[in-house]
């Protein structure tokens, strides 16, 4: 029971975690269009007006070389070496347009559209090329996780049902005589059944508590582990780190309901057989 | 009160009861006699709704027992007290708890349980053994506990299925006397047995059975098989 709820919990958290990561990445990155060197600002401005009519674009912001430098310096403030390498030379950075979209899922279409508008061939590259692989991988993982989660949850549900069913059946078997006598003196089915169903509920409840505790522990462990490596510190804190309380509460309620349902239902099934007298 | 109307019960190919018809009046004492396999236990199981007849009807107060809704069967059973040859006492409960058990099942209050249980133990003469466990009792005493449990719900009908089968003649006779006493107090009693001395000693109505058939039904009858 605990294992089952634990696994369901882990899959759920993973699922939500990856989903959030994708969302956050989609929202944060949007798309930046980088221009070739020496493209005059006037051309970029006219291009900007051309693409502003493309569907699904929320905003377009022009970033000059100087602004790009300033951003870089700001983001590298803890790593002086990186700043020293650039040595305040803005020509290291291309001018760019930062485009935000309304619906990140339709990012591909937007990029296609704005690339079509580039009749003069002034675009060097876009940030999409760089991030595409990551985003697509994440989306794939998410799909797999959703599928796997449903499949595994179903299997685990059946396993949990069987485990509790058998446990209760053994208990009932040892009390078979008592149940028979109860029936013969006129006990109703539910009078006999409810202690067993209650036992099942209790199993479910304890299972849910343990599974929830373990899920949270493992989750915290994961964050700590990811957080300790420098490359992902930001993304961890920004994505899976901040859905904490609400998600935990939901997970707990879900595990509780799931556990109690599985517990009571399997007990109900287990008692059915012995109440036929 | 009780009416068996051409009742037949098959277990696979075995005819445990073959077209049995008889009726029992309120407050009657009926001995059901015959060798093992004659159909006595089948009649009892049909009365307690443990089995359903293959053909025919079993009616109590004009109502067909086997047309009762499943949910109503527990309430029907509370009107019938049953005593078995093997006592069917719970070994891990005391004498008092075994009797109280039948009342607990019906959801009686603690006060009622205490007073009724004490009363019944007094009736069967076991008040002093209330705290004993079944394993500490003699066969006769255990059967008295079973009778007290059967009576504690004040049933209209008491069925005793070979109650003396495991007892020595002295204890068997005491149990028989107790059943007669209970009958005199107003409860209908059906006693299934193959104990000749007891049936003859009681001297009340006797229904004799053999191979699933009723072979005789006599008002002050004796145990006879032909």
Image: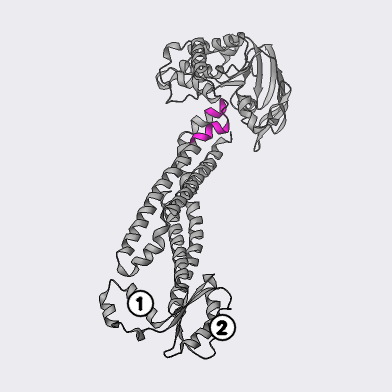
Q: Which residue is found at the position 36% from the left and 86% from the top? A: A91
Residue B200, horizontal then vertical, whole percent: 60, 11
Give the magenta range: A181-195
Q: Would residue A262 appear left or right of A76 to someone viewing this image? A: right
Q: Going 45% across and 19% down the picture, which residue do you hit?
A: B95
Give the number of callouts.
2
| As drawn, A255 above or below B138 | below
Q: What element carries label 2?
A: helix
Q: Name the residue at the front extreme.
A: A42
Is residue A201 in view from this perspective?
Answer: yes
Q: Quadrant of the N terminus of chain B?
A: top right
Task: Indicate the position of residue B41 as horizontal and vertical percent values.
Answer: 60, 26
Residue A259, position as x, y percentages in the image: 47, 47
The verdict on residue A191 being magenta is yes
Residue A70's disc is: 1
Q: Where is residue A84, by image quadrant?
A: bottom left
Q: Is the magenta region chiefly helix, strand or loop?
A: helix
> Where A169 falls versus A132 (above or below)?
above
Classify the position of the C terminus of chain B by image quarter.
Answer: top right
Res A103 → quadrant? bottom right
Looking at the image, tell me whether mark 1 or mark 2 is earlier in sequence order.
2
Q: Mark 2 points at which residue?
A: A50
Chain hosting mark 1: A
Q: What element carries label 1?
A: helix
Task: Please say whether residue A4 is visible from this viewpoint.
Answer: no
**Residue plotted at (45% across, 55% down):** A8
**Residue B110 numbered mark, or none:** none
Callout 1: 10 Å neighbours few (<14), some, many (20+)?
Answer: some
Look at the picture and state if B45 lies above or below A41. above
| Towards the viewer: B32 or B137 | B137
């Amino acid at each position: 029971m605990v294992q089952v709820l634990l696994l369901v919990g882990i899959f759920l958290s993973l699922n939500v975690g990856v989903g959030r990561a994708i969302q956050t990445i989609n929202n944060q990155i949007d798309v930046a269009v980088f221009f070739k060197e020496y493209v005059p600002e006037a051309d970029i401005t006219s291009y900007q007006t051309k693409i502003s009519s493309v569907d699904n674009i929320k905003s377009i912001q022009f970033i000059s070389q100087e602004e790009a430098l300033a951003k870089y310096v700001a983001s590298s403030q803890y790593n002086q070496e990186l700043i020293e390498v650039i040595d305040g030379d803005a020509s290291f950075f291309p001018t760019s347009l930062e485009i935000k979209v309304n619906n990140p899922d339709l990012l591909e279409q937007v990029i296609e559209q704005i690339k079509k508008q580039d009749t003069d061939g002034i675009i060097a590259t876009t940030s999409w090329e760089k991030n595409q692989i990551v985003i697509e991988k994440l989306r794939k993982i998410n799909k797999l996780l959703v599928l796997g989660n449903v499949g595994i949850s179903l299997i685990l549900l059946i396993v949990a049902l069987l485990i509790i069913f058998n446990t209760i059946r053994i208990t009932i078997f040892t009390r078979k005589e008592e149940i028979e006598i109860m029936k013969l003196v006129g006990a109703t089915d539910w009078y006999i059944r409810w202690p067993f169903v209650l036992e099942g509920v209790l199993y479910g409840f304890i299972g849910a508590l343990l599974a929830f505790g373990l899920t949270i522990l493992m989750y915290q462990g994961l964050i700590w582990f990811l957080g300790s490596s420098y490359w992902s510190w930001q993304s961890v804190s920004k994505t899976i780190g901040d859905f904490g309380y609400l998600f935990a509460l939901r997970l707990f309620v879900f595990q509780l309901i799931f556990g109690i349902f599985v517990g009571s239902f399997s007990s109900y099934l287990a008692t059915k057989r012995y109440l036929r007298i | 009160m009780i009416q068996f109307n051409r009742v037949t019960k098959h277990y696979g190919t075995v005819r445990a009861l073959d077209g049995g018809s008889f009726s029992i009046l309120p407050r009657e004492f009926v001995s059901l006699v015959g060798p093992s396999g004659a159909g006595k236990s089948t009649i009892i199981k049909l009365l307690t709704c443990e089995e359903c007849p293959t053909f025919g009807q079993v009616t109590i107060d004009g109502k067909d027992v086997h047309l009762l809704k499943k949910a109503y069967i527990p309430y029907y059973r509370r009107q019938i007290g049953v005593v078995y040859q093997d006592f069917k006492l719970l070994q891990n409960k005391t004498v008092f708890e075994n009797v109280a058990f039948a009342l607990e099942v019906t959801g009686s209050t603690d006060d009622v349980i205490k007073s009724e249980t004490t009363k019944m133990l007094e009736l069967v003469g076991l008040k002093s053994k209330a705290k004993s466990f079944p394993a500490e009792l003699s066969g006769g005493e255990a059967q008295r506990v079973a009778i007290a449990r059967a009576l504690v719900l004040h049933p209209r009908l008491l069925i005793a299925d070979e109650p003396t089968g495991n007892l020595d003649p002295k204890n068997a006779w005491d149990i028989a006397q107790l059943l007669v006493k209970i009958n005199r107090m107003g409860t209908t009693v059906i006693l299934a047995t193959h104990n000749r001395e007891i049936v003859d000693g009681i001297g009340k109505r006797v229904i004799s059975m053999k191979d699933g058939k009723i072979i005789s039904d006599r008002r002050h009858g004796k145990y006879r098989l032909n």
